[in-house]
């Protein structure tokens, strides 16, 4: 797969860096890229998605060779709001990501979230990600993972 739809955007940084960092207000998502594959970090909110009325996530990180997309939201404590933002961002960008596994990453400043296993919106969202070949991860202050 390819990142061609994103490479020419002024909102994207595409290269072979070993570490991709998306951060805002002391919250970070870090993606280690030890094999230095082509990756793109796209600033979605306030840049790539110019529809001001739409809910949108903060960043989209793409593993161009491995065909993985990571929709990233850096949030205070409102997990369900973060899920809504990522869900809408996926709906708006999915057509640009054929063949990509779609993942969601939510970094909260504090996690006051009750058990979500019975929340219908959370269950639907997690199932949607599974159907798209991806996963949902949430963490407090920082999430770090490798390709």
Image (cartoon, rainbow, N blue to C red):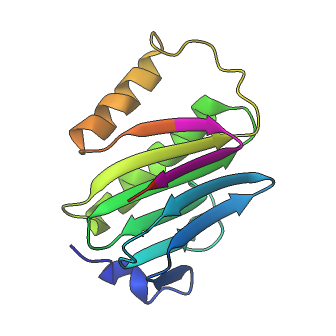
Residue 117 lies, in percent from the top left, at: 45, 13
Q: Which residues are magenta?
A: 138-145
Residue 38 seen in this snapshot: yes
- Compared with residue 114, is residue 137 higher up or lower down, i.e. above or below? below
Left or right of residue 112, residue 50 in this image: left
Residue 141 lies, in percent from the top left, at: 72, 43
Left or right of residue 78, residue 60 in this image: left
Residue closest to the eye, 32 or 83 = 32
* Quarter that holds the N terminus: bottom left
Q: Which residue is rendered at x = 32% and y = 39% of the image?
A: 129
Q: Main secondary structure of the magenta part?
A: strand
Residue 45 lies, in percent from the top left, at: 62, 63
Q: How many marks?
A: 0
Residue placed farthest to the right in the image?
25
Residue 43 seen in this snapshot: no
Q: Quadrant of residue 48?
A: bottom right
- Compared with residue 87, is residue 29 higher up or lower down, i.e. above or below? below
* Quarter that holds the C terminus: bottom left
Residue placed farthest to the bottom in the image?
8
Q: Which residue is rendered at x = 45% and y = 24% of the image?
A: 122
- Compared with residue 30, is residue 141 higher up or lower down, i.e. above or below? above
Q: Quadrant of residue 124?
A: top left
Q: Is residue 45 magenta?
A: no
Q: Which residue is rendered at x = 26% and y = 64% of the image?
A: 67
Left or right of residue 78, residue 12 in this image: left
Q: Is residue 144 magenta?
A: yes
Residue 146 lies, in percent from the top left, at: 43, 56
Q: Which residue is rendered at x = 34% and y = 80% of the image?
A: 5
């Amino acid at each position: 797969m390819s990142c061609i739809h994103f490479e020419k955007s002024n909102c994207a940084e595409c290269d072979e860096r070993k570490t991709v960092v998306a951060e805002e207000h002391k919250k970070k998502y870090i993606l280690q890229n030890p094999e230095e594959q082509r990756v793109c970090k796209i600033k979605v909110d306030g840049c790539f998605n110019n529809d001001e009325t739409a809910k949108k996530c903060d960043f989209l990180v793409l593993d161009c060779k491995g065909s993985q997309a990571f929709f990233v939201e850096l949030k205070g404590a409102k997990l369900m709001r973060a899920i809504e933002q990522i869900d809408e961002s996926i709906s708006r960008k999915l057509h640009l990501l054929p063949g990509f596994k779609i993942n969601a990453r939510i970094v909260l400043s504090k996690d006051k979230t009750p058990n979500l296993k019975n929340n219908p919106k959370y269950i639907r969202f997690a199932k949607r990600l599974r159907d798209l070949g991806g996963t949902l991860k949430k963490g407090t202050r920082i999430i770090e993972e490798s390709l």
